[in-house]
Amino acid sequence: MPVLDSQLKECYRDKRECVIGFPESLLPSSKVEEYRAMPRLAIVEIAGRDSVAAAVKAVEGEGFSDLLPTYVYTGTEHGPWSGVNDAVERLSGRLPKIRVHDLLVFGSPGFWQALNGRFINELIAKFGFFTPCIGCHLYLHSVRIPLALTLGKVPIISGERESHDGSIKINQVSEALTVYQEMAREFGIRLLFPLRHISEGNRVRNILGFEWEEGKEQLGCVLSGNYRRLDETVNITGGEALKYFEKFAYPLTREIIETYVAGQAPSHLEAAARFLGF
């Protein structure tokens, strides 16, 4: 569908505020009603290899018949748009008996900025460290919640894993994944991590049924690896991340999502400043 693909490319390029009130050209009201009538629909995160494998495993375990692929932009990603389309095509090819619907692209740079960009100095002073990655993943999961509610409290599938062949990603430690799921749960949404306890990359490849190297053939992030030292070690603990969530990111995100769900546009930076004590 060349016209739709062109619109999605524009969304990726322009990164407009788009969390609620989708344009009819991207999400027609008639399509919303169709989705609401699907009893086994799930929203799928489209990011890279693990997100596609997670969708496959979720279908096997939960019996979903329809999948809505979604790409959420952050403002820090880079790379060819074709990587997103390729991931959707791989998902469709791997699950030929499942209806994989048209990709939806959306997000909120203002939301991301409030969590991760504007108040870096204050966050370091308050918590003694900073990395945008844990707030970024909280954003990525939470910004899908209003859509999930609109479509009838449908589940969201993500490819998060606590360990990657022994390598730890601070945004995917156990404490962080539990926080992401709790945020969704507050709004009555199930956030599924089918790969959460799968560490071995070869097991992910087996689920996929084809070769796809981790971290390849997908969009990249200019901040990738920012929390690693020169020797690749990570000196931020899960406990420190949890403190950041509890004292700032979680209550801020909950208020922002509540505002979206109420059909209003949040004042992202004003809310963030208030939670930091300004």
Image: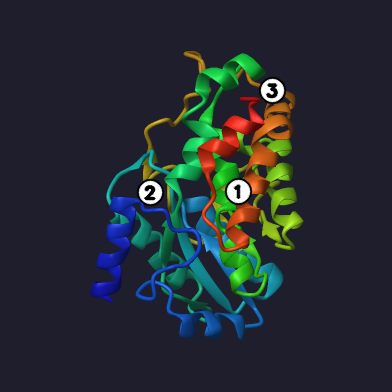
Figure check: 150 above or below 206? below
Residue occupying the point 41% across, 73% down: 102
Instruction: Looking at the image, tell me whether mark 3 or mark 1 is earlier in sequence order.
Output: 3
**Residue bearing the label numbered 1:** 256
**Nearer mark to the viewer, of 2 and 1:** 1
Instruction: Looking at the image, tell me whether mark 2 or mark 3 is earlier in sequence order.
Output: 2
Figure check: 117 above or below 97? above
Figure check: 61 above or below 1? above
Image coloring type: rainbow
**Residue bearing the label numbered 3:** 237
Q: Secondary structure at mark 1?
A: helix
User: How far is the residue under mark 2 from the one under mark 1?
Assistant: 29 Å
**Nearer mark to the viewer, of 2 and 3:** 3
**Residue bearing the label numbered 2:** 218
Q: Is residue 58 visible?
A: yes
User: How far is the residue under mark 3 from the one under mark 1?
Assistant: 26 Å
In depth, the one of 88 and 164 nearer the eye is 88
Q: Quadrant of residue 244?
A: top right
- Disc 1 marks a residue whose amino acid type is Ile
Q: Is residue 214 visible?
A: no
- Disc 2 marks a residue whose amino acid type is Gln
Q: Quadrant of residue 173?
A: top right
User: How far is the residue under mark 2 from the one under mark 3?
Assistant: 28 Å
